[in-house]
Amino acid sequence: MANKKRNIRKESSPLTSRPANLSTSQPINQSTDYHIPVLLHETIEGLAIEPDGIYVDCTFGGGGHSAAILAQLSENGKLYVFDQDGDAAKNVPDDKRVVFIQQNFRHIQRFLRLQEVVKVDGILADLGVSSHQFDEADRGFSIRFNADMDMRMDRRQSVTAFEILQQYSETQLHKLFEQYGEVTNAKTLAKTIVSVRNVVSLKTIDGFKNAVREVVKGNPNKYFAQVFQALRMEVNEEIQVLREMLEQSVALLNPGGRIAIITFHSIEDRVVKNFFREGSFEEIEENPFINTRRQEIFKVITRKPVTAGQDELKQNSRSRSAKLRVAERL
């Protein structure tokens, strides 16, 4: 059974913005056309990979981060990669150290156990939508194309963006646009959708954009990008999925094991920050008059989130909102 113990690192290596020493001796298979991995060197350095360790990439995508992990592993190392999008399977390298699991990483513990894995040495999750998903018109993620209002990362699931637009109440729509999209006139948008959805079709991207065009505020591209982000996060239950994975990471990680999470939304980043610091999803206010002792679960490696440097921003504009946080299991 793949359930080995490791020695806790005596000194936690600081995470800097310098590139990690990535060996290229191992075969690497990654699709930069599918997705360019963000904060690649910083993430690999943050994981402080043990050559014989067991690692999990929760968001395999084009395999960029996984390729860099493999380059650090010995022939005895193991990498389990999750991706609910079946398209990602095409990017899996022919490498006996890699096991591809086509499932949502909210089920990480369950499917690792099916592989007889109980403990791991590192977990990585890049929560951004892949370039491939944005660029595939029929997926409905991008405002650039006309397609069905879909936005499912896992096409096996039933709920689409169109069904949310048709079925959610005005209050529910208002809440999701406000929280997940930070849409300035979320209430007006929700009211408009409810008033027109039984008169005009919202099934396609163009149909939806035309139906609500009169209430668009500011730059239409930015406005619809925020709206689409909110719908995508709701369709795929992204915040709930993140919480479930973080909770399971506590039992999965060996002492000294690292977890690295790349977020693209302030809510995601806040969830990760609070969980790493407090072992909770709630922000806990410091009270000098109350001595509350809590059991620390993680040592925070990144006191502040790591962001992309100027070189990466020039090469990949989608890295602009990326934030990396790393913690070590105590």
Image (cartoon, rainbow, N blue to C red):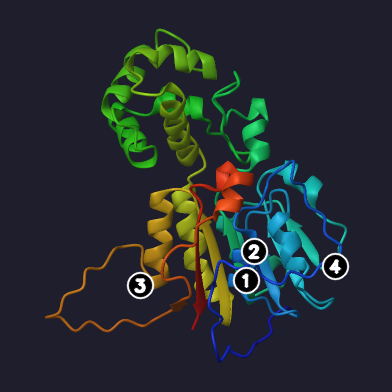
Tell me which numbered mark, 1 or 3, is placed earlier along the sequence.
Answer: 1
Give the camera-side residue of 163 and 173.
173
From the image, tell me which residue sits under label 2.
41
Residue 308, position as x, y percentages in the image: 54, 55
Name which residue type carries label 1. Answer: Glu
Name which residue type carries label 2. Answer: His
Camera-nearest label, 3 or 2: 2
Tell me which numbered mark, 4 or 2, is placed earlier along the sequence.
Answer: 4
| Residue 1 image-quadrant placement | bottom right
Q: Is disc 2 in contact with disc 1, using a CB cutoff of under 8 Å?
A: yes
Q: CA distance from mark 3 to mark 2?
A: 27 Å
| Residue 175 image-quadrant placement | top left
From the image, tell me which residue sits under label 3.
278
Mark 4 lies on a secondary structure that is: loop
In the image, is residue 18 above or below residue 268? below
Q: CA distance from mark 2 to mark 1?
A: 6 Å
From the image, tell me which residue sits under label 1.
45
Mark 2 lies on a secondary structure that is: helix
Residue at position x 79%, y 49% in the image: 91
Residue at position x 58%, y 21% in the image: 148
